[in-house]
Amino acid sequence: MGAKRESRELVTNGNMIPLARPVLGKEEMEALSRPLSSGWVTQGPEVAAFEAEFASAVRSPHAAAVCNCTAALHLALRAVGVTAGCEVITVSHSFIATANSIVFCGATPVFVDIEAGTYNISPRLIEQAISERTRAILCVHQMGMPCDLSSVLAIARRHGLAVVEDAACAIGSEALLDGTWQRIGRPHGDVACFSFHPRKVVTTGDGGMLTTSVDDWDARVRLWRQHGMSVPDHARHEADRIVIEEYLELGHNYRMTDLQAAVGRAQLSRLSELVHRRRELAGLYDGLLRDVPGLLLPEEPEWARSNWQSYCVRLPDRCDQRKVMEGMLNDGIATRRGIMCAHLEPAFVQGAIDWRQEGSLAESEAALGRSILLPLYPQMSEEDQERVCGALRKACAR
Ligand SMILES: *Cc1c(COP(=O)(O)O)cnc(C)c1O
């Protein structure tokens, strides 16, 4: 059942409108032929070029590629000094990897609630969650919508906390900071982490990127992603003498391959176009759905420009979420329920994982139980969007 659902979300199946669909074409196929013909397929020249291009796209001094965003989050937290016994303030209302990355460090996730309209962390709830064990805030730009960074950063500065941005969904999103529009990932906090899973805006199959302006953190992340090895593979192979590597610290195998990076470079060159199209589609949804009684559309604060990685609507109170989703599925439209809440999942409920919540998580639970994600991908036609909206209207009226 799980596998069937996934394929419905990603693949066009006859007349079915999928939830998401990556834009992959001739450019990606040609890009793949470079590592395939050179024979250098793991972390090497393509990864280095992808990192340089990514850093310049988000104007970050450093970008380090890894195998996925979950690995990026783990290394980011390790870099800012999150260790066993620390607490990290975050949201439960996120993909499970956000909370898990804190647990990987032996630290305790402290969940606070979200704001209903943006689905992002509520900055006014952060301060009361701070304890003497708090080391960092892990804020999420959920579904590509920038969170309220200026408020989060001000609180972090006041209390001497690190800020890691879970920007898994937010490549190409922008925030208005110090009077200028800036892409997420500069980073504005201490480290930002991106995902290239196919459900995100650009994809390498699986993949992640970590950006920071701190030289030492970038260097340590590069060490940790490759087993803690003193000499990376490509340097060893290019050397004209025998080089014996050492293993300096506990590391991981979190490398991105050159196959992924080659595809990533082609994807990155499409970024502005992809974001432009997604913003256009979100605007069309707003127009088509504005008059559905009781339906709440997502809010874009005046200081945020989302890449609309997902378009999430809050159903009218009278509607049953599952029935609406089933009704739409019968009309050939894939949807997904609102973003999950880690604190409701068996792994967190069963007691083996140490976590706590500060205050109620009612908005997080309501967003999960009362919202659905609508299909949004660049290849969608006006007719597709009208079909989605027609099916939603019909399912809500039932
Ligand atoms: C997708 C996602 C992740 C995990 O990214 P992977 O690249 O699949 O590891 C983490 N956080 C958020 C908010 C996500 O949406």
Image (spheres, rainbow, N blue to C red):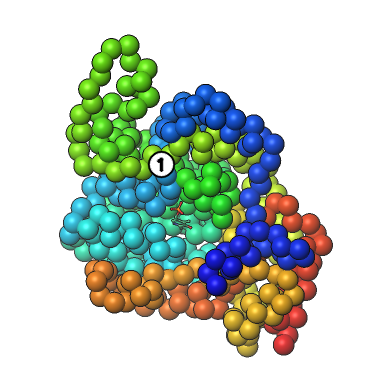
Tell me the residue that label 1 is attached to: 66
Residue at horizontal 32%, vertical 72%?
A: 348
Specify the quadrant of the image occupied by residue 308.
bottom right
Specify the quadrant of the image occupied by residue 104.
bottom left
**In the visual, does 91 lie left or right of 203?**
left
Identify which amino acid the numbered label 1 is placed on: Val
Q: Position of residue 179 (x, y in %)?
A: 53, 43
For residue 66, above or below residue 154: above
Residue at horizontal 70%, vertical 51%?
A: 378
The C terminus sits in image quarter: bottom right
Classed neighbour count for the residue bearing mark 1: other residues with Cα under 10 Å, few (<14), some (14–19), many (≥20): many
Residue at horizontal 60%, vertical 39%?
A: 267
Q: Position of residue 253 (x, y in %)?
A: 33, 42
Q: Position of residue 246 (x, y in %)?
A: 20, 29
Q: Position of residue 121 (x, y in %)?
A: 43, 63
Element carrying mark 1? strand
Q: In this view of the protein, can residue 269 be seen by the observer?
A: no
